Amino acid sequence: MGSVTRSQQNNITSPNGNSLAVFVEGLTGVMKVKDVMGNIQPLSDFINSSTLEGTQYSYVAGNGTPTENATELQTAYNLAKTIVGLSATNRFKIIVGTGKYEFVGQFLIDTQYIDFVSLTGDADVEFTNGISVTANNVFLKGLKTSLPFQIDTNLNLLICDTCVGGNQSFGGNTNIIVSGTFTNCVGGIQSFGGSNATSSGIFNNCVAGGASFSLAGGATGIFNNCVAGNSSFGITALGTFNNCVAGTNSLGSGTASGTFNNCVGGNQSFGGVSGGTLTGKLFYCRLTSGTFQTVSGAGRTYYCVDGNGNPNNQ
């Protein structure tokens, strides 16, 4: 591989033919080019500093105003939509720089196989007017908004990683199915399947406020290391719950028929409401107040501790 010459610009010989000589100017450290006519210009004059493109990606720097950033991002997205032959195994990635992006209304992610990824991997790509996702097979990393991060129903191939939304995000207080995979994501109250939604996806290390991870619709998915407030993880909990923490009336407060490993709930959790049932299996679970419901059917509690500090093995 060749190297870039560091020299005074007058010492660089003009190239022959249709080519350019590239060098670093010795005094300033600026990379420059010299053409066959002897003209010298900074290399940056020939590069769009805010958008770089490859066959499988483009980069949006986000170093303008929020509205300029939004225009630049939308332009890159529109161009990506024209690519023929995108598929689950032939994807296009838009790498987005840290900054604020202000669209007129929500930013709409509506095309499969075009992914959006923060340059840093952190949740630092901020959409000031919210986000709406209707495309199923997309990967989103590092996107955030203080408004609802809305997703359409039953997007089973959606993957969100390190994304942040406000209240009613990732399937808010609507009658939808929240499928897909969510990892290291944060939402406000009624998120990841709010009060009327069914949470059937995979949720890893996610955090939300109260009435999250489903309530009326049921928590039927896989929940690993997730935290929420009161009335969370379903009135009916049929899924698998590992190391999850919630407030009162949670973790299947009406019907706890799933599998719970090392989970913590408040009073009236795990089927603890009046008339509730505990037919699932609890391993090393704990109540912060109150006592466990009496098991029925195939229900079992193994090495659990109630809110009074008493062991519970049924």
Image (cartoon, rainbow, N blue to C red):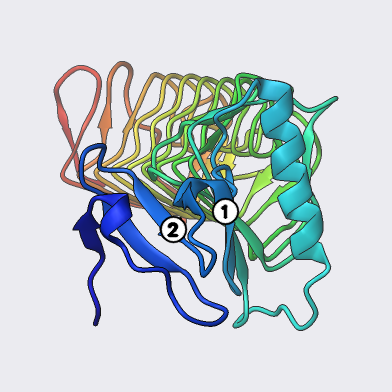
- Name the residue nearer the viewer: 41 or 158: 41
Number of numbered labels in the structure image: 2
| Amino acid marked by disc 1 | Phe
Q: Disc 1 designates what residue?
A: 46
Residue 99, x across and y down, in percent: 53, 28
Residue at image location 47% in from the left, 80% down from the top: 16
Quadrant including the N terminus: bottom left
Residue at image location 44% in from the left, 42% down from the top: 162
Labelled disc at residue 186: none
Disc 2 secondary structure class: strand
Residue 297, x across and y down, in percent: 46, 57
Residue 261, x across and y down, in percent: 28, 50
Q: How crowded is mark 1: few (under 14 residues within 10 Å), some or many (20 or more)?
A: few
Q: Disc 2 designates what residue?
A: 33
Residue at image location 24% in from the left, 50% down from the top: 8
Q: Residues within 10 Å of mark 2 (few under 14, many from 20)?
A: many
Relative vertical location of residue 6 with respect to residue 85 in this rendering, above or below = above
Residue at image location 45% in from the left, 60% down from the top: 34
Relative vertical location of residue 167 with respect to residue 108 in this rendering, above or below = above
Relative vertical location of residue 46 with respect to residue 295 in this rendering, above or below = below
- Name the residue nearer the viewer: 132 or 23: 23
| Amino acid marked by disc 2 | Val
- Name the residue nearer the viewer: 104 or 130: 104
Contact check, label 1 and label 2, Cβ < 8 Å: yes
